[in-house]
Amino acid sequence: MDRVTKEKGFPLTRLFFKPESSSMFILIVMLIINIVLQKNFFETKSIVRNINAFAPLILLAMGQAIVIVSGGLDLSSGAALSLFTCVLTTVMKQNEPITGFYALLVTFAIALMVGIVNGIGIGYLRIPPVIVTFATSYIWLGIALFLRPTPGGETVGWFRIFYRARSVEGIPALIRTMDNFIPPALILVLIGCLLWFVVSRTRTGRYVYAVGSNMESAYVSGIDTAKTQMLACVMNAVFIFLAALFFVAQNQSGDARMGGPLTIKSIAAVVVGGISLFGGRGSIYFALVGAMILELVSKIIFFADIPNAYQTLVSGIIVIVAIAGPAYVMFNKEKR
């Protein structure tokens, strides 16, 4: 029986040889381990805490996934996140609620600018994405340090609506009740998912995959590859902006260095989610799965009470296994 016959006869086999299936299997295993170790896992407060812990990396990973699927890579996402938190806390003045709206508008405009600058370098100037975003990461970090040399800044009271709505004075009772079950972090993630859902139904969404799969063929087919890659970078910046709203609402301050470690984690989450680093393949939504897996690693280590001396080693081993699963499936798929 040849390979084609096997695949046609056994849909479950076909399903198994998908990177997304490997990612889901790893996530289920991680969840089971975490449920066993964390006795109060299903309590409402615990679920809300987990969502708050997962949301920032999920948003960054989904944005990173769009860039990667389009054939690029963003090494500046963490620095951009730090920059946005610094801008928000610089524009806002604690005793002037209206400045919160100014901060949103200014930071969103800067987010669009960040996406356009990365997109011009990658799409129009044809500079390798690693070089472009590595360079811009220092630009964003430099501006952030200029605005906020040390962590701090000001926020308006109502801005906590992006983290804990019930703590905002004068908030309607309905929203206060909903906040106990639907945390703002989840709403931000749903907004991100809705954004990609809408875009994926347009030509731009299809072009993102076409350009990442084969840029030359896409160009010959009449697709504006440079514009598509720039739009992918802009969408990524919007996801980073959503993550910045959560961080500032949660910490009530801006920090020029807080986003640094999240850059590599966002890329790792994309790979764990079964998305090819070579572009054109993988579901953007599965970056969410990859991010959850990586965040569950730290929780498992914490609840397993692993000694500090071994935490980094164990974390690294788990992450390697999580990355190796989808990578192995993709490798076998290409060989077959």
Image (cartoon, rainbow, N blue to C red):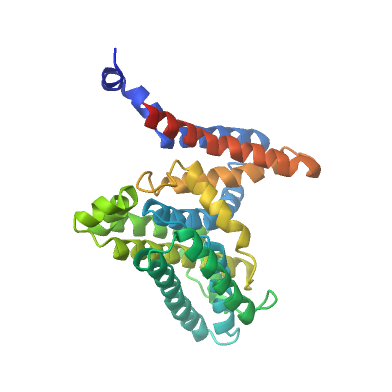
Q: Quadrant of the N terminus?
A: top left
Q: Is residue 178 visible?
A: no
Q: Quadrant of the C terminus?
A: top left
Seen in the image, is 53 located left or right of residue 72?
A: right
Q: Quadrant of residue 86?
A: bottom right
Decide: is 169 above or below 78: below
Q: Nearer the viewer, residue 308 or 42?
A: 308
Q: Position of residue 30 (x, y in %)?
A: 58, 36
Decide: is 178 above or below 296: below
Q: Nearer the viewer, residue 75 or 30?
A: 75
What residue is shown at x 45% (from left), y 62% (from top)?
Answer: 239
Seen in the image, is 52 located left or right of residue 331?
A: right
Q: Nearer the viewer, residue 163 or 17?
A: 17
Q: Position of residue 19 (x, y in %)?
A: 43, 35
Total residue callouts: 0
Q: Nearer the viewer, residue 69 or 100?
A: 69
Decide: is 140 above or below 72: below
Q: Quadrant of residue 169?
A: bottom right
What residue is shown at x 47% (from left), y 70% (from top)?
Answer: 172
What residue is shown at x 50% (from left), y 72% (from top)?
Answer: 171
Q: Position of residue 90 (x, y in %)?
A: 58, 82
Q: Residue furthest top?
A: 1
Q: Position of residue 210 (x, y in %)?
A: 28, 51
